[in-house]
Amino acid sequence: MAPLKVLVGVKRVIDFAVKVRVAPGGQGVQEQGVKHSLNPFCEIALEEAVRLREKGDAAEVVVASVGTRQSQEVLRTALALGADRAVLVEVPPGGPALGPREVAAALSRLVARESPHLVLLGKQAIDDDCNQTGQLLAAALDWAQGTFVSRLALEAGAVRVQRELDGGLETLRLRLPAVLSADLRLNQPRYASLPSIMKAKKKPLELLPLPELLGCPPAPPRLRVLRLEEPPGRQGGQRVENVAALLERLAAAGRI
Amino acid sequence: MRLLPALRLRPGPSAAAPGYRQGQRPEPRTREYFYYLDHQGQLFLDDTKVKNFITCFKDVAFLSFFFKQLEQNRSGRYEAEFPFLSRCGRERNFLRCDDRPVVFTHLLPGDSRLLSYCGAGERLVVPFQPEKLTVFPENGRLYHPAPAKSGGVGLVRSALALEWSSRFQYEHGQEQPPTHFLWEGRSYRLTEELLPLLWAGSARECSDIPISTCPT
């Protein structure tokens, strides 16, 4: 089978272990000085792409991110984890937050430039939980899509995927090219050894301004955050002796 | 169940059921549980089918007690498959690891110079000794001293090694392990004193032993 080119999209997000706080003004969360890392789902997508190359099914793994210059950190991490080269589609800091619509538009232009046979993304980012970029990108490209992928196997001109759905597992065979989004069960990412980290410093990392990639100024975002608030604090509970007492308490509170 | 060609069922302690049952009672009033620690320092029940940052144990009190009690498994039970043991009263909690039973995740903020491990924040820490950081040539991973009871050496998790990677200096060229570590304005010559422990541990490792019989 002819080796193929895989493009992996990754996102820099606030680390999952951080206790997130709403920023003053209620329009976003505190990001300054807060630990960021590679989105866990993106890491899994990348791991799968690297495994495909190590098996000989893929010839090249290109990793890309759409974000400010700080996103170079996660691209360097991705190179250390085995990607061959990286592209940062750069946006200036302080601009409006990019959502799946803007990212999918950028990635579709990158696909036109790079001509991969397969695009692998994480199924969602842990900051916005949108779970839309893969789907929007596949639609923009008019490619087959396999989302929530928990197993993946390449065949001649196609990819067989197992999808994790609420009702069970679905197996699909998709003709290439295709966009896939990785679910947690797909794999467990590797440890980036020190030699890999050192080699990664020499791998190419290209900075590509977004307007240059699009060939025009980016369209303004269509979503505006009205308000962001933390969930209400947990109230204390009450213990009751038995079901009868529970029903009485609920009725007295007007709940039933 | 029809399997995709890329799937292979891996035999061994991670396969559900054979060899043990969680909570089994080999003697009266004694229960046994079986755990797994991955290379990111995430602790799971060994037979958890899906192991990731969502399904790992997170309770700091539990983790702190579990790892403080951790020692080599010399109980005569499951010693080969689960090299470590954490006792809780009469309960035996067996542990096997992807790498080491101690995985360092981050330095505590501030001037404390304390290195935290296994997800318990400030409750599981060792003093940070930059000169003792060691790259093990066999696997390229980064290690640091750990409590002696747990084997004396712990893995520095990948994300932390990446953060620190630009602080290493290579006097003999980058094909060789690093020789110095830059920290707080000082260049520490790496002593590599953990290497004998790492080589000894590597010789002892037998990570793919399947459990074929269940001790009664």
Image: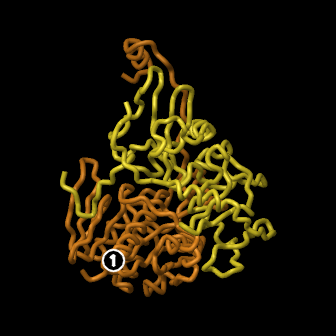
Chain colours: A orange, B yellow
Q: According to the image, label 1 marks what residue?
A: A56
Q: What element carries label 1?
A: loop
Taking the image as shown, residue A154 lies to the left or right of residue B201, namely left
Chain ID of residue with mark 1: A
Q: Is residue A86 above or below residue B201?
A: below
Residue B168, given in percent of the width and then of the height, sits at 69, 72
Whether residue B115 appears in this view of the structure is: yes
Q: Is residue B106 above or below residue B19?
A: below
- Residue B105 sits in which quadrant? bottom right
Of the pair A163 and B39, the residue shown nearer to us: B39
What amino acid is labelled 1 in the image?
Gly
Disc tally is 1
Residue A40, given in percent of the width and then of the height, sits at 47, 60
Of the pair B74 and A207, the residue shown nearer to us: B74
- Residue at 56% over, 53% down: B100
* Badge 1 density bin: few <14, some 14–19, many ≥20, Cα 10 Å: some
- Residue at 57% over, 55% down: B201
Q: Indicate the quadrant containing the C terminus of chain B: top left, top right, bottom left or bottom right.
A: top left
Whether residue A27 appears in this view of the structure is: no
Residue B76, given in percent of the width and then of the height, sits at 49, 36
- Residue B154 sits in which quadrant? bottom right
Of the pair A204 and B157, the residue shown nearer to us: B157
- Residue at 42% over, 27% down: B26
Residue A237, given in percent of the width and then of the height, sits at 51, 25
- Residue at 31% over, 80% down: A4
Most extreme residue toward the right, as rendered? B186
